[in-house]
């Protein structure tokens, strides 16, 4: 009887071994494809686009002397050169876990195509322009949201006006920083 149980266990182990190797092979292929997918995102262009966004987060540079403003820009550029490769290296395992093997193969095929490469490049070219458009669309939406909030909170006319003035002041500061 023990021999039968041991034989059955051995058979199950033998059957399970190819499945485990197959699962490891698929996981390995998914990770390889995820790294290719990330590389196809044109890291350098993304770093430049993000660098411009980060510099925009420091509106005080407009009032700095040129040398200090340049120091801020250079520091942000150096930070992005360090940050982006580390970020992309860390992203690949996430994509490998989330996407199926079939999806990763399709993503890589698309991003390796002329259309895929063009889409990535043009997305980075469009990012600053979309940021400008967003800044024109957002203030009226925020103003309507402030009205709805005041309606719910039953703001006084003075409180409503103060909130709108503060909102307009922030929008003006952001616009002058550009």
Image (cartoon, grey):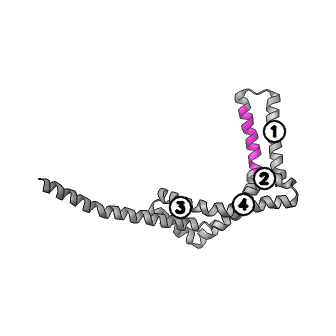
Above or below, 137 relative to 81: above
User: Which badge, 1 or 2, comes first in the chain's sequence?
Assistant: 2
Q: Please tell me the numbered disc located at residue 166.
A: 1
Magenta segment: 135-149
Q: Please tell me the numbered disc located at residue 92.
A: 3
User: Which badge, 3 or 2, comes first in the chain's sequence?
Assistant: 2
* Front residue of this view, candidates 139 and 175: 175
Question: Real-space Cα distance between discs 4 and 2?
Answer: 11 Å
Local packing at callout 1 (Cα closer than 10 Å; few below 14, some 14-19, many 20+) is: few
Above or below, 90 relative to 159: below
Residue at the disc numbered 2: 58
User: Which badge, 4 or 1, comes first in the chain's sequence?
Assistant: 4
* Residues at discs 1 and 2 in contact (Cβ within 8 Å): no
Q: Please tell me the numbered disc located at residue 51.
A: 4
The quadrant in which residue 149 appears is: top right
The quadrant in which residue 8 appears is: bottom left
Question: Real-space Cα distance between discs 3 and 1?
Answer: 42 Å
What residue appears at the point 72 percent right and 60 percent down from the top-left corner? 51
Question: Real-space Cα distance between discs 1 and 2?
Answer: 20 Å
Quadrant that contains the C terminus: bottom right
Q: Which residue lies furthest to the left in this view?
A: 1
């Amino acid at each position: 009887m023990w021999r039968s149980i041991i034989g059955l266990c051995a058979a199950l182990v033998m059957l399970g071994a190819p499945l485990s190797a197959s699962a490891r092979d698929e996981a390995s292929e998914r990770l390889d494809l995820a790294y290719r997918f990330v590389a196809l995102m044109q890291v350098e262009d993304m770093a430049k686009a993000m660098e411009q966004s980060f510099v925009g987060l420091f509106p005080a540079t407009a009032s700095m002397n040129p040398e200090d403003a340049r120091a801020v820009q250079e520091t942000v550029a150096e930070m992005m050169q360090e940050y982006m490769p580390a970020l992309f290296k860390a992203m690949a395992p996430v994509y490998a876990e989330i996407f199926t093997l079939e999806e990763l193969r399709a993503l890589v095929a698309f991003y390796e195509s002329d259309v895929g490469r063009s889409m990535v490049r043009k997305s980075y070219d469009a990012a600053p322009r979309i940021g400008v458009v967003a800044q024109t669309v957002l203030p009226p939406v925020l103003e309507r949201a402030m009205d709805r909030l005041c309606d719910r909170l039953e703001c006084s006319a003075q409180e409503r006006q103060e909130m709108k003035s503060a909102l307009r002041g922030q929008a003006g500061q952001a616009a002058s920083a550009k």
